[in-house]
Amino acid sequence: MNEPLNAKKTALSPEHESAWSNYVEDFRRAGHDTVDWIAQYLNTVAGLPVLAKVKPGELQDSLPASAPEQGESYAAILNDFERLVMPAVTQWNHPRFFAYFGCTGSTPAVLGEMLAAALNTNGLHWRTSPAVAELEQRTLDWLRQWVGLPEGWFGIVYDTASTSSMHAVAAAREMVAPEARTSGNPPGLVLYTSEQAHSSIEKGAIAIGIGQKNVRKVPVDSEFRMWPEALATMIEQDLAASRRPFCVVATVGTTSTTSIDPVPHIADIAEKHGLWLHVDAAYAGAAAIVPEYRHILAGADRAHSLVINAHKWLLTPIDLSAFYTRRPDILRRAFSLVPEYLHPQVDPRAHDLMDYGVPLGHRFRALKLWYVMRYFGREKIEAMLRAHIQWARQLATLVDADRRFELVAPVPFSVVCFRFKGTDEQNKAILGQVNASERFFLAHTVLNGKVILRLAIGNLATTWEDVQEAWILIQRGAQAFE
Ligand SMILES: *Cc1c(COP(=O)(O)O)cnc(C)c1O
């Protein structure tokens, strides 16, 4: 029944034709079944435990140690997926997933992913798939307009913000120390970011050989924002010691508390010293779609590059990171290895995406974002973002009103950081109890040496009731310590 393709038959033989059409028909049936499975999953995911309960090695041990010699039916595969794999899945697409950053694999994006996989088209340069290059340019330009970045910025899709920021750091080095491309890093290059920056910034610096000891962690103020006066002083000290500052990374929406670095002030300093300014807005950049939150990207127009993850708060399943730069010429200088005379295109509108980064192959990722932006439209996305921010505010008000708890950071977006006014162990116990309920997943962070509870809203299906119930459970957990 489930007859795999017979490679011995020639492509033109009638037997081949019928094997091929069986193969496609098999897909058609299983595809419908799979879409039905997904629809059923989306209707019932809210009732599943958020956190996978398996022990390390459990899934691996339940799977055969070697791959099948003979092909199997789709039904058998889907059955094992449900029976064995699903219990080991932590449900990021769950409305009560409040850990890290809440996110959504939305249905239009699922369909976009499916089409991208079916085409398997690779946009390494323009000619290898004009659709990949041009739909990506158009879609990222739409997003650029939504968040209010300047006209003319170049956008490219990478897998993650970590990759995006590594490319920013490499472009920064190309601008300040172009000799590094042929001779390796000159001594003394220094990068600046805040104590609250995401680890990917330091990782990017490690990856391109800057060295951890040349990453300056600028102190933050009481609201976890980079302290620009300290940045200026650190740069002066490095210059006095004949080092070469080359890059500043500001964060709009830090990972722990979603604090916003003072980008305009940081831009002044970066401009004064001729440094590349990269803005990491991986999570919070999406909020700029909401008109009254446009201001969060103030000063970003003066940056050299900026990253926003569509796979965080923009309804797109992992992975899709939108990287923007106003200096694509420098990014290209850093990464292009194709001599000009070998360039297949001379048309300035034909972008060869392989010239703008480490990967050669370029997935048709933009297709899923294009689906998302068209299916929901700006207004629906704006409404979701606004609601999430509002619920975070409401939760902050509830926390503030309970004398047993304290807010530990402002709530500019959809993340609330708070703690039970007790010991770290008590806070961990409360968190453990909430997560053990299986109905929620919250993570903790550490601020000023203390364990902090952190609730992040970001899923399309989340309601205010979900947030309220989490709070009730947290309060109940605190009762044990009264
Ligand atoms: C999540 C996050 C990152 C890392 O994102 P990935 O896409 O997982 O690499 C980087 N910076 C900030 C501010 C983030 O919130």
Image (cartoon, grey):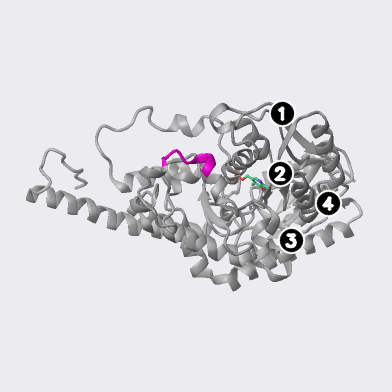
- Residue 409: mark in rendering: 4
Check residue 298 in the rendering and tell me which mark sits there, or answer none.
3
- Given residues 169 and 368, the one toward you in this image is 169
Q: Is residue 153 left or right of residue 235?
A: left
Number of the front mark, 1 or 4 = 1
SS class, disc 4: loop
Residue depicted at x 71% and y 44%: 275
Query: Is the residue 18 above or below the residue 466 in the image?
Result: above
Can residue 260 be spotted in the picture?
Answer: no
Q: Which residue is mark 2?
A: 275
Element under disc 2:
loop
Could you tell me residue 165's position as x and y percent?
62, 43
Q: Sequence-wise, which precedes: disc 2 or disc 1? A: 1
Tell me which residue sits at (26%, 39%) in the image.
71
Spatial separation of the CA atoms under disc 2 and disc 1 = 14 Å
Give the mark, 4 or 3, whose residue is nearer the N terminus: 3
Q: Which residues are magenta?
A: 333-339
Residue 15: in magenta span? no
| SS at mark 1 in the image | loop
Frontmost of labels 4 and 3 is 3
Which one is earlier in the sequence, the residue at label 3 or at label 2?
2
First of labels 1, 3 by sequence position: 1
Q: Residue at x 87, y 51 (%)?
A: 405
Disc 1 designates what residue?
188
User: Observer-nearest residue: 224 or 409?
Assistant: 224
Is the C-beta of the residue carrying label 3 under 8 Å from the nearest atom of ligand 1? no
Q: Find the distance from the CA under tag 4 to the CA under tag 3.
A: 21 Å
Mark earlier in primary sequence (1, 4):
1
Q: Residue furthest bottom?
A: 379
Q: Are marks 1 and 4 in contact (CB under 8 Å)?
A: no
